[in-house]
Amino acid sequence: MEKWECTACGYIYDPEVGDPDNNIPPGTPFESLPEDWVCPQCGVGKEFFQKIS
Amino acid sequence: MRIIIVGNGVAGTIAGKTIRELDSQAEILIYSEERHPYYPRPNLIDFLAGIIPLEKIFAFPEGWADRQRLQINLGRKIVGINPERPSISLENGEIVTGDYLVLTSGARPLSPPLAGLEKKGVFTLRTLDDVLELLEYLTSGPEVLILGGGLLGLETARALCQRGVNRVSVAEYFDRLLPRQLDENGAGQLQKELEKIGIKFYLGKEAVEVLGNGSVSGVRFKDGQVIPAGALILASGIKPRTELAEACGLLCSRGVLVDDYLRTSHSKVYAAGDVVEHRGKIYGLIPAAFDQARVLAYNLCGQIKRYEGTVPFNTLKVAGIYLTSIGLVNPENGDYEILVKHEPEKGIYKKLILKNDVPVGAIWLGVKKGVQEISRVIQAGKSLTGYKERVFDDNFDFSLILES
């Protein structure tokens, strides 16, 4: 699964880890995160993330 | 290696952070005239709206900079730079020298040519301090007029409505909203939706004078109309802060000129973010500043990388309205093919701009499904040949294109 990086702060969303603090279980692909999910580090929305190639 | 970074916005911060990732030994000093640690600017809008508290707008927890061994000096205004030494001068006369300078001083709000801007109650929204000042002024309950129907103007209007400000109006010089990110159809649709949440619009209006005796009482427009307002917010665009670069002879046009390696015209000075002009473009967008800062850091650390531009990507989220604008949305000549799906009754408008079947721009309004996917198609330059009839279907499987 693909990792995504926050363009505001550099946080990396790793689907294998998920975001347990915000009830996102491991194994959740970035595309399946809820629309109102925000970067757990800096708080910007999903639209500021880009796929790491 | 000792690197001095001017500015602690997204470009300066990501540059510093990335240099540290690449070089554990480098001395990294960041100077900023702002007194607050780094925050992503979109968070200011949510703070203004009252959705997030002050402490939530900052990107990094306390102690982060120390752990990264970034020496961040806040509230220090830089008054000059000297590429030859290389060094910077601070307001108190202190001079700090290093091996390289990184110029990430950002942009400032454009001041429209308008009389009376010095009156009390005129605001710009660029920094956290700007927002704090506005919030204090709003406690007196003024009617708010925003000059500029671009992204910042609309986001601000939305935020003020959410905060509960009673009367919010937007005046725009063009005859439609978001002239850079939308076409006529899309702008009309968006305007209708925004009017539903209580924002009032005045289009095709050129402001000429701020009225009021000491404090703002309204604005007079070229056609003679007067719109009353107790607070005026200027949101008519940004201007790169080129003054430090110009004063020391670095080549500038509208922004500080940089090459594909993010070098300015002096080999010891690099630059990134809203202050730069790259291949004729000033982006004013977080993803572009981020890309540039990363490439800059790699080049400074001896790992040569090229920056070839960023596909502009804008989104606006307003109480149930989703708008995304990617790349080229208003082509100027006929070499492009336009695909449109418009369902006014559902508030949905989708448009794709193709060149030889390859999409180069998109508008997605009223719907978020497919946005990430179409953005990836555009960035990857994939062809839509064979899928043009189906690409707007709600359950179109983009992996057919992305994995081809």
Image (cartoon, coloured by chain):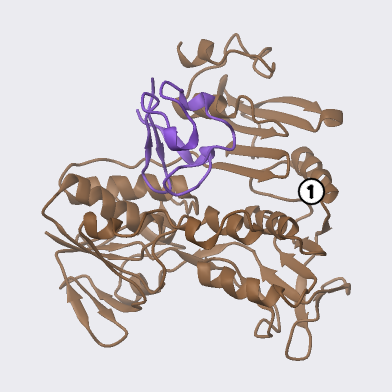
Chain colours: A purple, B brown
Residue B260 in view: no
Residue at 61% across, 29% down: B335
The answer to whether residue B122 is left or right of residue B342 is: left
The answer to whether residue B248 is left or right of residue B221 is: left
For disc 1, the neighbor class at 10 Å (few under 14, some 14 to 19, many from 20) is: some
Estimate the x, y position of residue B302 in percent, counting from the top left.
Answer: 15, 46
What chain is tagged by disc 1?
Answer: B
Q: Between residue B389 and residue B372, name the one nearer to us.
A: B372
Estimate the x, y position of residue B332 in percent, counting from the top left.
Answer: 64, 40
Residue corresponding to mark 1: B194
Q: Between residue B386 and residue B136, name the one nearer to us.
A: B136
Classify residue B386 by image quadrant. top right
Estimate the x, y position of residue B134 in percent, counting from the top left.
Answer: 64, 72
Q: Is residue B283 above or below residue A36?
A: below
Q: Is residue B49 above or below residue A45?
A: below
Estimate the x, y position of residue B74 in percent, counting from the top left.
Answer: 34, 72
Amino acid type, callout 1: Leu
Tag count:
1
The answer to whether residue B188 is left or right of residue B376 is: right
Residue B307 in view: yes
Residue at 68% across, 69% down: B233
